[in-house]
Amino acid sequence: MKNSIALGLMLMSGLGLMPAAASAVEKDFPSRPVALVIPFPPGGATDVLGRVMAVKLGAELGQPVVVENRAGAGTIIGASYVAKSAPDGYTLLVSSGTTFTVNPAIRNNLPYDPVKGFDPIGIAGRTGLILLANSQVPVQTVKQFVDYVKASPGKYAYGSFGSGTTAHFAGETVLNATGLKMAHVPYKGSAPAMTDLIGGQIPFSIDTVAAAIPQLKSGKVKAIAVTTAKRSNLLPGVPTMAESGYPDINMDTWLIVAAPKGLPAHVKAKLEKALAATVADPDTRAKLVAQGFEPAYSNAAAASELINRELPIMRAVAARSNITAD
């Protein structure tokens, strides 16, 4: 009986009738280009970082890694596309907490499950979030910021790169910890938020360290504090909110590479190895650092643990501050 089945499978394979999933597993992965889906528009931070990583990742895999921008709906379009793709390793996603922990905290009926819909490959690195001030605002420290805002309740606002983003969540966490009352002004991206901060239309903003560094170097804005537990290696002179008296504030943004759930073990292992080598590559690291990103690889298990740990935290922040999807 077993010989008959084996003979039948051989005949099916020879005639091109073998099921696609079975034949895909038999091939050495990868045997064709791999798509890296970026759920943000071209030119943004994730897009730039994804394209830098794609070059070395392709070299490690021995096949081109082709970037596909599938932007829209707060990363939902791109994330949903990947979650529904074949779990064969040929469609990957690179995205931030927006996809995996923020959207689930503020949106009902997502077309993807942040935990059950993906097999994380690993964390590529992180970038901090930072409280910024217009250069003319008479504030240099967190204490001065708190005193300045408290002196005029309800007068001041802060901007972020979007409603329901990690910057918005960080801003509301800062307000809750300090007891401040400020209006939130959401922008469609870092660029317009930074433009208004520089121009004085808003006195404060929360942004990524990556977006802030060029403007800080030019003196157009001021850094008050980062929201991470440790100081940023890229801005070692800027204190943390924790150092400034608010030890419970610890928020950043990170990039995870993930595949659709159900990835074959040998394919996942090869992708993990390739991502680790990509992040360790000196030339790639230098390019990532130049973009304000702190490369630091963590494996698939660590990526899953990060998502599971942050999900309840983000849900709590959303509930406390009444953050909902617009």
Image (cartoon, rainbow, N blue to C red):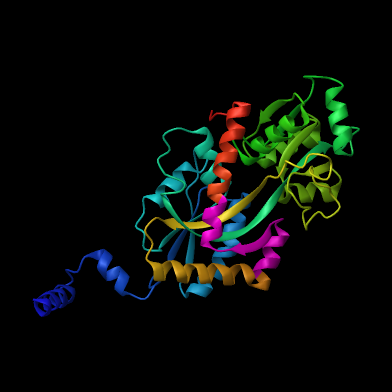
Q: Which picture quadrant has residue 2?
A: bottom left
Nearer to us in this view, 58 or 130? 130
Q: In which quarter of the image is the N terminus?
A: bottom left
- Seen at 52% across and 46% down, the residue is 100
Classify the position of the C terminus by image quarter. Answer: top right
Q: Residue at x 80, y 19 (%)?
A: 153
Residue 21 in view in this figure = yes
- Pinpoint residue 8: horizontal percent, then vertical percent: 11, 75
Residue 142 lies in magenta, yes or no?
A: no
Q: Position of residue 116 (x, y in %)?
A: 41, 49
162 relative to 74 in the view: left or right: right
User: Residue 91 at what x, y percent from top left?
Assistant: 42, 59
Res 316 → quadrant: top right
Q: Does the magenta stretch include residue 304?
A: yes
On screen, residue 271 above or below 219: below
Residue 163 visible? The answer is no
Magenta extent: 284-306
Q: How many labels does the image show?
A: 0
Q: Main secondary structure of the magenta part?
A: helix
- Left or right of 70? Residue 12 is left
Q: Is residue 170 left or right of residue 311?
A: right
Above-or-below relation of 266 to 39: below
Foreground residue among 10 and 202: 10
Q: Which residue is drawn at 30% across and 69% down?
A: 24
